[in-house]
Image (cartoon, rainbow, N blue to C red):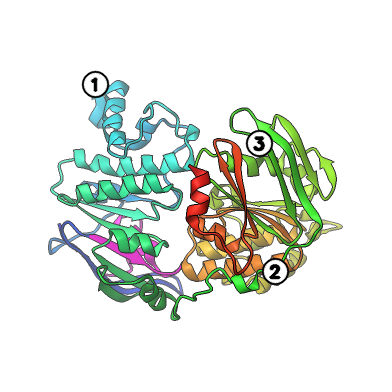
C-alpha cells in the first residue's frame, strides 16, 4: 500500500493548521515526522486517520482517490492511529476497548461472546509483550500500560481482511521505559513485511533509530524530506527551529548554588512496599532530581508530597513545620504546586480558557465583591502569558487549542499564580518539542534564581543530570544513592544507572 497526501490544506476559520502538505508513505516504510509543537503533525495524522477532513488537496491509496468520513472508514482501509492523548475509555475492560465498534465480530445468538473477545484481545496483547488479563478495566492500568494497550489495539487490524496496514504512531514512546520502547521498535521492525508506519516523536534520536525517511514540518508546512541514514539530530533541529542545537542545552552555565534554607524535608516516609524509609532534603533554589525506573516508587513518592496519595508513616516538613497534607487542597495551602505527567487529564481543564486555567488554583487572586472579577482574571492571565512567553491568540481561547509546550507553560503559570514556592515537576517536558523544552529549562533556571524549590522527575536520564543540583536514585521503593550534580562536574549516566537496576 502506498499512501500519498498532496498539497493538503486544513483551515479553521482564519487559522491555517496545514498548508499544502505533501508526503508519501511507501510499502514497508517507517516514516519519521518531526517538528515543533503546532507545526501541523497532529493535524496531518488526523486527516490520514479520518478524524478530520482536509479543506483542500488530494489523498490517494495506491493511486486511487480516498476520502474517509470517519476513523471506521480508515480502519476498513487498513489505517489505524495510536493517539498521543490516548483514546481508551477507562471504565471499559481492555478487551472492550480494543474491539470498540467491532462487537459484531463476536456476536453469538444475539449476544456478545466476551470470552471470545478476551481471547482475541490476549493474542494481540502478546504481540506487545503485555501479560495482563483482558478483562481488567483500563482505569486500573498505568499510563505506560495503557499506551501498550493502544498499540495492541492498532494491531487488531491484522485480523481484518486488508491487504496492507498503515499504523500512525503519535508520540507512542513518551511514557515508556527503555525496555518497553525496545519491545515497540522490535514489533515495528517485525511488521514491516506487511505494514507501514508513520512515527511522530519529539525524541529525535528515536526517530533516527527507527525511521527509513524523515519529513520535517514547520508552521503547517512540510519543509524537508531526507533519508534517516546519515542524518543527525542537529540537522533535524536546525530545520525544525531555524537554529543549531546548543551544546549547553540544559543551560548548565546558568545553574547557581542553592541556598542553605530548607524548603521541604521528608523523614522516614513510607507506604507499604511502594516506598519506605525515605529521607530527603530540598533546599530553596535547588532542583532535586529523582531517578528510577517505573516501579521504583518515585512517582508515588512525589504524589504523596502533593497529597494525591497518603503515606502510612513518616513526616512531611514544609519550611520547618511538620505538616499534614491529606489532599491536594492542603498542599496548595502550604505552598506546594504539582505539574503532573498526564497534563491533559490532571494538569488542566481542556475546555476552559487559558485565563481560567491559570487562575484555577488561586481564585482569591481574582475575587471581587460580586464574585469572580473577569477583568482582573484577564489582566492576571496576560501577565503570565507575557512573563512565560505563552504563545496563544489570547487568554480567552480554550487551553486545549494551544500546543503542548504552551499548555505546559500555562500549567506552570497556574502554580506561580498560586504562590507555590515548592514545585513538583513530574515529567515537565513530556510531549514538548525541542524548542519548547529549551524554554522550560530556562524557566526552571530562572525560578531557582528567584528562590523556588523544585522536585524533579525528568523525561530522560540526561535531562535529570542536566537540570539537577543533586540526584536521588530509587530502586524497589528505596533510595539507593545520592549523587551531586554541580555545574561543570555532572555525573555520567552509567554512575546513576548502576544504582537504578
Mark 3 or mark 1, which is nearer the start of the sequence? 1
Which mark, residue 366? none
Q: Is residue 129 visible?
A: yes
* Horizontal arrangement in the rendering, residue 347 relative to residue 86 (left or right): right
Residue 421 appears at what percent x and percent y? 76, 57
Residue 340 appears at what percent x and percent y? 59, 50
Name the residue tied to disc 1: 108
Residue 202 magenta: no
Residue 313 appears at what percent x and percent y? 73, 30
Please tell me which residue lies in front, 40 or 470: 470
Of helix, strand and loop, which one carries label 2?
loop
Closest to the camera, between mark 3 and mark 2, is 2
Name the residue tied to disc 2: 256
* Quarter of the rendering containing residue 446: bottom right
* Horizontal arrangement in the rendering, residue 202 relative to residue 191 (left or right): right
- Which quadrant holds the N terminus? bottom left
How far is mark 3 from mark 2, CA to CA? 32 Å
Amino acid at each position: 500500500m502506498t499512501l500519498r497526501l498532496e498539497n493538503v490544506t486544513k483551515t479553521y476559520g482564519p487559522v491555517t493548521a496545514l498548508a499544502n502538505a505533501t508526503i508519501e508513505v511507501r510499502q514497508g516504510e517507517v516514516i519519521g515526522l518531526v517538528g515543533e509543537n503546532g507545526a501541523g503533525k497532529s493535524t496531518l495524522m488526523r486527516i490520514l486517520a479520518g478524524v478530520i477532513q482536509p479543506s483542500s488537496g488530494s489523498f490517494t491509496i495506491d493511486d486511487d482517490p480516498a476520502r474517509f468520513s470517519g476513523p471506521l472508514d480508515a480502519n476498513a482501509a487498513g489505517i489505524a492511529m495510536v493517539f498521543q492523548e490516548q483514546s481508551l475509555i477507562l471504565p471499559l475492560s481492555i478487551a472492550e476497548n480494543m474491539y470498540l465498534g467491532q462487537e459484531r465480530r463476536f456476536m453469538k445468538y444475539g449476544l456478545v461472546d466476551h470470552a471470545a473477545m478476551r481471547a482475541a484481545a490476549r493474542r494481540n496483547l502478546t504481540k506487545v509483550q503485555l501479560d495482563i488479563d483482558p478483562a481488567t478495566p483500563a482505569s486500573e492500568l498505568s499510563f505506560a500500560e495503557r499506551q501498550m494497550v493502544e498499540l495492541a489495539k492498532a494491531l487488531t487490524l491484522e485480523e481484518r481482511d486488508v491487504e496492507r496496514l498503515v499504523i500512525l504512531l503519535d508520540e507512542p514512546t513518551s511514557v515508556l521505559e527503555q525496555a518497553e520502547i525496545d519491545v515497540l521498535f522490535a514489533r515495528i521492525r517485525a511488521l514491516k513485511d506487511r505494514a507501514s508506519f508513520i512515527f511522530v516523536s519529539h525524541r529525535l534520536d528515536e526517530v533516527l533509530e527507527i525511521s527509513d525517511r524523515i519529513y520535517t514540518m514547520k508552521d503547517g508546512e512540510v519543509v524537508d524530506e531526507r533519508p534517516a541514514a546519515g542524518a543527525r539530530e542537529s540537522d533535524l533541529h536546525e530545520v525544525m527551529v531555524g537554529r543549531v542545537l546548543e551544546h549547553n542545552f540544559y543551560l548548565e552555565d546558568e545553574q547557581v548554588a542553592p541556598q542553605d534554607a530548607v524548603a521541604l524535608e521528608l523523614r522516614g516516609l513510607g507506604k507499604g512496599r511502594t516506598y519506605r524509609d525515605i529521607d530527603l532534603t530540598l533546599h530553596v533554589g535547588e532542583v532535586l532530581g529523582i531517578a528510577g525506573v517505573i516501579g521504583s516508587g518515585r512517582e508515588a513518592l512525589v504524589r504523596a508530597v502533593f497529597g494525591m496519595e497518603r503515606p502510612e508513616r513518616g513526616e512531611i516538613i514544609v519550611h520547618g513545620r511538620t505538616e499534614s497534607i491529606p489532599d491536594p487542597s492542603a498542599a496548595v495551602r502550604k505552598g506546594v504546586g504539582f505539574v503532573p505527567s498526564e497534563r491533559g487529564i490532571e494538569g488542566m481543564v481542556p475546555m476552559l480558557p487559558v485565563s481560567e486555567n491559570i487562575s484555577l488554583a488561586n481564585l482569591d487572586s481574582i475575587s471581587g465583591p460580586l464574585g469572580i472579577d473577569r477583568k482582573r482574571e484577564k489582566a492576571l492571565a496576560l501577565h503570565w502569558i507575557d512573563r512565560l512567553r505563552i504563545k496563544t491568540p489570547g487568554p480567552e481561547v480554550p487551553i486545549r487549542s494551544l500546543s503542548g509546550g504552551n499548555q505546559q507553560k500555562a500549567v506552570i503559570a497556574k502554580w506561580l499564580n498560586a504562590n507555590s514556592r515548592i514545585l513538583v515537576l513530574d515529567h515537565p517536558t513530556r510531549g514538548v518539542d525541542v524548542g519548547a523544552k529549551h524554554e522550560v529549562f530556562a524557566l526552571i533556571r530562572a525560578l531557582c534564581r528567584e528562590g523556588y524549590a523544585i522536585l524533579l522527575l525528568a523525561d530522560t536520564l540526561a535531562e535529570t543530570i542536566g537540570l539537577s543540583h543533586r540526584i536521588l536514585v530509587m530502586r524497589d521503593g528505596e533510595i539507593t544513592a545520592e549523587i551531586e550534580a554541580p555545574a561543570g562536574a555532572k555525573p555520567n549516566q552509567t554512575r546513576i544507572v548502576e544504582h537504578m537496576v
